[in-house]
Amino acid sequence: MLFRSKILEKELPPINFEPGKMSFELKRQNLTVKDFVLKGDNLEIDLTGRVTTREDLMSSRMFLTLKIKPSETMEDALGIIMMTLKEPDANGFYQIPLKGTLKNPNAKP
């Protein structure tokens, strides 16, 4: 799957994703992301955590961690955004906590 995008009016390099791997578990009101991996030529994405579901789905609360591993080309294209992230882990992934509700997500690196 080829994906193209712009951030802050800057064209990002295309990302050609391989077929992804996803696994979820729903118990009572908790949707657990057991495995969510997308690998592309310019970006790898890993998502873990859980979502506490509510009757109003958009009010469901997220307790997720998004991990991204951009290629050098992607890092250069993201520019100033990369400076807001903490240092990558030993495997080169930047971790971004995703909290809040589905309606009003909050991502604070």
Image (cartoon, grey):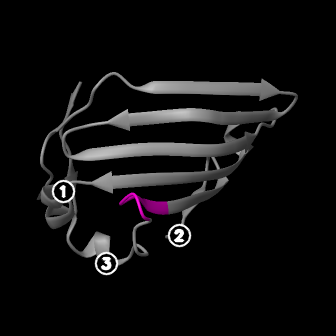
| Local secondary structure at mark 2 | loop
The residue under the point 12% across, 57% down is 73
Residue type highlighted by circle 3: Met
Q: Residues within 10 Å of mark 1 (few under 14, many from 20)?
A: some
Asked which quadrant contains residue 10, the reply is bottom left
Q: Is residue 56 visible?
A: no
Image x and y of residue 34, in percent: 64, 34
The residue under the point 28% across, 26% down is 18
The residue under the point 80% across, 37% down is 54
Residue 107 appears left or right of 1: right
Q: How many marks?
A: 3
Q: CA distance from mark 1 to mark 2?
A: 20 Å
Image x and y of residue 25, in percent: 72, 26
Indicate which disc residue 74 carries: 1
Q: Does label 3 or label 1 sit earlier along the sequence?
A: 1
Residue type highlighted by circle 2: Lys
Image x and y of residue 62, in percent: 68, 49
| Local secondary structure at mark 1 | helix
Q: CA distance from mark 3 to mark 1?
A: 13 Å
Q: Is residue 53 visible?
A: yes
Residue 91 on the magenta segment = yes
Residue 84 appears left or right of 109: left
| Local secondary structure at mark 3 | helix
Position above or below: 104 against 102: below
Span highlighted in magenta in the image: 90-95
Indicate which disc residue 108 carries: 2
Indicate which disc residue 57 carries: none
Q: Does label 1 or label 2 sit earlier along the sequence?
A: 1
